[in-house]
């Protein structure tokens, strides 16, 4: 497993010196715990600002986990090749101007295993995931495409079940599947069924959402309990001798988002908390806006069943994927209105403020733990929950 930049910074600090200064001279170690903490933070900041580079010779599963390896792959390979002003924000959907209209465009691929799980399946997941990416961009989702990659031997009954689930999810979200494609590959070349969906929506509100808009003093809100989907998928594989009454939270967020924006039009940013979980979004906020983020562990809603499963598996719920939860950044004075608006919708009944944006320690996410201390929340390293979407 690749060491995180936090591990590297701590290791260097333990060597008893800081790096060379601007003139190449070794600096003396800072005295005291406060000095050591600042030393580590400085090293972290320098490491994060280095140009991303994929050091592996081959793609690994970690490159799809939504964590540090994924971000490095996207920035060093794809963004470097396709760089343009519409792509560079790396939001959940691109915002485009076409013939005087403002639209949002997004695409996503779904390779979840197993295909069917408590609370949903790959079909409604594919529809809801794309609807949600459009919604958090401030768009009203309208139309979807659906591309299927089917493995030879895949049961037609299962395909019918997946397609019917997509149909029902599209109807619930108020969107239509208007185009698509089908490919069949030889047995053993896929895992039953993969789905790609693209979506188009219209942006009618005068808003400019994006994590780079976050400002010190802003409140960070999550719309409900986190980690339900990722833990459901892990347990549904049947590889662990753990039983828990958990179900995926897969759901369309367009109604929830509309209610929030109607009440709080000054929302700064929204993100769909999928791969990499809430921790990844907090890091994206800190990096894009060059701000610090302080979250409070006790304020983050997690169902007891999910927390218990995470403890048994040795996984932090903050890194576990959701498929029906969003993270919103709003001005501090609007936090109460935002939480009330989210709680007025069935999907947001347990919405909560989980942290604040601050000037201190830009680029760093810290968590105030239940024990009263603080710890740094890094991007996910490795791949504890593969193929959750």
Image (spheres, rainbow, N blue to C red):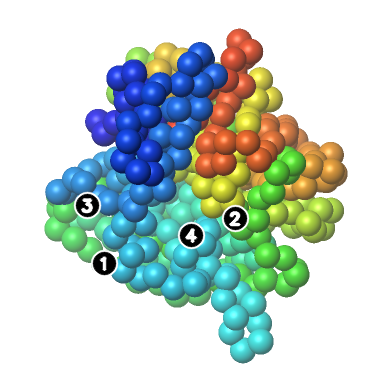
Q: Which mark is residue 281?
A: none
Residue designated by label 2: 212
For the residues labelled 3 and 1, say whether their Cβ atoms are less than 8 Å apart: no
Label 3 neighbourhood size at 10 Å, few (<14), some (14-19), many (20+)? some
Which numbered disc flags the more N-terminal residue, 4 or 1?
Answer: 4
Mark 2 or mark 3: which is in front?
A: 2
Residue designated by label 4: 90
Mark 3 or mark 4: which is in front?
A: 4
Alpha carbon separation for disc pair 4 and 1: 29 Å
Alpha carbon separation for disc pair 3 and 4: 29 Å
Which numbered disc flags the more N-terminal residue, 2 or 3?
Answer: 3
Q: Indicate the quadrant containing the N terminus: top left, top right, bottom left or bottom right.
A: top left
Note whether residue 249 is visible.
Answer: no
Alpha carbon separation for disc pair 2 and 4: 10 Å
Label 1 neighbourhood size at 10 Å, few (<14), some (14-19), many (20+)? few
Q: Position of residue 284 (x, y in %)?
A: 52, 46
Q: Indicate the quadrant containing the C terminus: top left, top right, bottom left or bottom right.
A: top left
* Kind of element beneath mark 3: loop
**In the picture shown, does residue 210 fall above or below 385?**
below
């Amino acid at each position: 497993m690749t060491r995180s930049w936090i591990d590297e910074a701590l290791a260097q600090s333990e060597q008893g010196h800081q790096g060379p200064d601007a003139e190449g001279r070794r600096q003396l170690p800072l005295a005291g715990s406060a000095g050591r903490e600042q030393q580590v933070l400085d090293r972290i900041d320098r490491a994060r600002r280095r140009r991303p580079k994929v050091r592996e010779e081959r793609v690994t599963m970690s490159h799809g986990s939504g964590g540090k390896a994924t971000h490095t792959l996207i920035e060093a390979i794809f963004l470097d090749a396709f760089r343009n002003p519409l792509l560079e924000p790396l939001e959940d959907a691109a915002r485009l101007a076409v013939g005087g209209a403002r639209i949002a465009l997004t695409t996503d691929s779904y390779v979840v295993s197993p295909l069917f799980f408590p609370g949903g399946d790959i079909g409604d997941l594919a529809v809801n995931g794309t609807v949600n990416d459009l919604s958090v961009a401030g768009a009203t989702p309208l139309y979807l495409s659906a591309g299927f990659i089917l493995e030879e031997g895949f049961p037609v009954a299962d395909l019918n079940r997946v397609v019917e689930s997509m149909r029902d999810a599209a109807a619930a979200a108020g969107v239509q599947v208007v185009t698509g494609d089908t490919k069949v590959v030889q047995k053993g070349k896929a895992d039953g069924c993969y789905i790609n969906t693209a979506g188009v929506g219209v942006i009618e509100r005068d808003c400019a959402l994006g994590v780079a808009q976050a400002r010190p003093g802003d409140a960070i809100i999550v719309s409900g309990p986190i980690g339900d989907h990722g833990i459901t998928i892990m347990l549904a594989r049947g590889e662990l001798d753990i039983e828990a009454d958990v179900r995926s939270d897969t759901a369309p967020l367009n109604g929830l988002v509309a209610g929030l924006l109607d009440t709080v039009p000054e929302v700064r940013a929204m993100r769909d908390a999928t791969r990499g979980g809430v921790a990844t979004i907090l890091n994206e906020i800190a990096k894009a806006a060059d701000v610090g983020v302080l979250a409070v562990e006790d304020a983050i809603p997690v169902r007891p069943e999910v927390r218990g499963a995470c403890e048994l598996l040795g996984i932090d719920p903050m890194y576990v994927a959701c498929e029906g939860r969003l993270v919103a950044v709003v001005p501090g004075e609007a936090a109460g209105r935002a939480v009330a608006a989210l709680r007025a919708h069935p999907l947001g009944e347990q919405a909560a403020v989980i942290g604040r944006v601050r000037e201190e320690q830009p680029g760093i996410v810290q968590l105030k733990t239940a024990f009263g201390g603080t710890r740094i929340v890094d991007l996910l390293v490795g791949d504890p929950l593969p193929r959750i979407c």
